[in-house]
Amino acid sequence: MENIKRGLLIIISGPSGVGKGTIRKEIMDDETLNLAYSVSMTTRKIRDGEIDGKDYYFVSNEEFDRNIKEDNLLEWAEFVGNKYGTLKSEIERLRNLGKNVLLEIEVNGTKQVLQKCQGDDVLSIFLIPPSLEELENRIRARSTESEEAIQKRLAKAEKELKMQGDYKYVVLNDDRHRAANEIKTIIRQNIVKN
Ligand code: 5GP
């Protein structure tokens, strides 16, 4: 049987509203990168336009806690009152198929992955906004959340920006096509190394 080369684990992180989702979709469209997206589990309410099983697995608090207890999560974190986590099974299945697996997660989850996967092929990328004002505009533009939740996301963003030193690459999202191209180049270089 042909030996399949295990794929890379690629973490894309950055403050809420920085444009991770948009850039992720643009990168995923490039078939030459052989990417697969790891769908996370969350207790957050589903937003308009989101699809269960595609954007997230939307679950109850009880179901999330059961997954923690059963050690099914590679990492998990609480973010503005909701839990988010990465399923080990999802990652393993895709990497063993040779796919380079993309995780879109926040900073505390990244710390856990970097700790657990030392020596493994992990690539960490942090996206930064041109300014905090621009970030606030983006959060407000897309948000369906209360003013209180928006304020919490903004306060969290300032803290998250301070963690960019944990990442191997920092990419400025001044323009989504430019930023996506920069990330594609980074991934391509690391696939070659791998
Ligand atoms: P949102 O509610 O805007 O979809 O996500 C809130 C934050 O949670 C974002 O920074 C997003 O990247 C992060 N996030 C999404 N899935 C996961 C996950 O599985 N683990 C962790 N640690 N963070 C996640």
Image: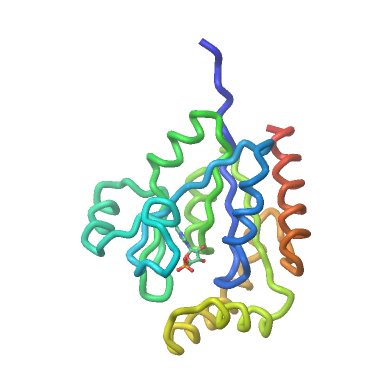
Nearer to us in this view, 171 or 178: 178
x and y, in percent, of residue 84 in the image: 40, 61
| Residue at the limit of the structure toward the top, as seen here | 1
Find residue 194 and report its image quarter. top right
Q: How many marks?
A: 0
Q: Residue at x 61, y 61 (%)?
A: 22
Q: Relative to residue 66, is residue 165 drawn left or right?
A: right
Q: Residue at x 55, y 22 (%)?
A: 4
x and y, in percent, of residue 132 in the image: 67, 82
Nearer to us in this view, 67 or 159: 67
x and y, in percent, of residue 131 in the image: 71, 79
Q: Residue at x 48, y 47 (%)?
A: 38
| Residue at the limit of the structure toward the front, as seen here | 49
Find residue 192 and report its image quarter. top right
When the figure is inspected, residue 188 is found, relative to residue 39, above or below; the finding is: above
Q: Relative to residue 132, is residue 93 drawn left or right?
A: left
Find residue 65 and report its image quarter. bottom left
Q: Residue at x 60, y 54 (%)?
A: 25
When the figure is inspected, residue 4 is found, relative to residue 62, above or below; the finding is: above
x and y, in percent, of residue 120 in the image: 56, 38
